[in-house]
Image (cartoon, grey):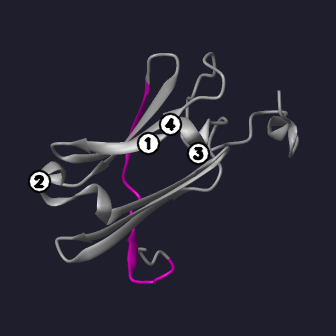
Amino acid sequence: MLSTTNSSYKTMTKYTFYESGEKYIKVLLDFPDAKKLISKDQITCNFDVRSFEIFINDYKGANYTFAVPKLHCRILPPDCSFGFKSNNVVITLRKKRNGDNWWSLFKQKAVGEKEGDSDKDE
């Protein structure tokens, strides 16, 4: 079991995300030669209905983490995953509702929205 409580993780702040069709959001974290230098057993990824966190262990001797404590919209955790492209770790988030438009990865309060408005289950 990987230790994810260790404070020796560097927090990543740079990422790219995009909608992939109407069902998925892809989050890309830049790791040069990721496909060659990182294996799935070096990664722990936790998904919840409104958040996720990922821990990457021992990439070129350092540990990294990236987390979104409140996603823009809800996801279906069992259908989320991670993988690799040549220079990226790719996190695939399955939208709870296909029609949701993610204009941001992180939840931001809309004009006129009260705290808790968007947290209600639909």
At label 1, counting other C-alpha atoms closer than 10 Å, the crowd grade (few under 14, some 14-19, many 20 or more) is some
Q: Which mark is residue 106?
A: 3
The amino acid pointed to by label 3 is: Phe
Q: Tag 4's secondary structure?
A: strand
Would residue 65 be found to the left or right of residue 67 on screen? left
Please tell me whether residue 9 belongs to the stretch shown in magenta: yes
| Rendered location of residue 103, percent (x, y) | 55, 29
The amino acid pointed to by label 2 is: Lys
Q: Tag 2's secondary structure?
A: helix
Tell me how far mark 1 sits from mark 4, CA to CA. Answer: 7 Å
Tell me, yes or no, whether the two marked residues, 3 and 1, touch with CB atoms within 8 Å.
Answer: no
Residue that carries the numbered disc 1 in the rendered image? 81
Tell me how far mark 3 sits from mark 1, CA to CA. Answer: 18 Å
Q: Tag 3's secondary structure?
A: loop
Tell me how far mark 1 sits from mark 2, CA to CA. Answer: 19 Å
Earlier along the polypeptide chain: callout 3 or callout 4? 4
Q: Nearer the viewer, residue 103 or 76?
A: 76
- Farthest front residue? 1
Which of labels 3 and 1 is toward the front?
A: 1
Range of the magenta residues? Answer: 5-19
Does residue 106 lie above or below 99 as drawn?
Answer: below
Q: Residue at x 47, y 74 (%)?
A: 4
Which of labels 2 and 3 is toward the front?
A: 2
| Rendered location of residue 21, percent (x, y) | 45, 16
Tell me, yes or no, whether the two marked residues, 1 and 4, touch with CB atoms within 8 Å.
Answer: no
Residue that carries the numbered disc 4 in the rendered image? 93
Which of labels 3 and 4 is toward the front?
A: 4
The amino acid pointed to by label 1 is: Ser
Residue 110: which quarter of the image?
A: top right
Q: Which mark is residue 112?
A: none
At label 2, counting other C-alpha atoms closer than 10 Å, the crowd grade (few under 14, some 14-19, many 20 or more) is few
The amino acid pointed to by label 4 is: Leu
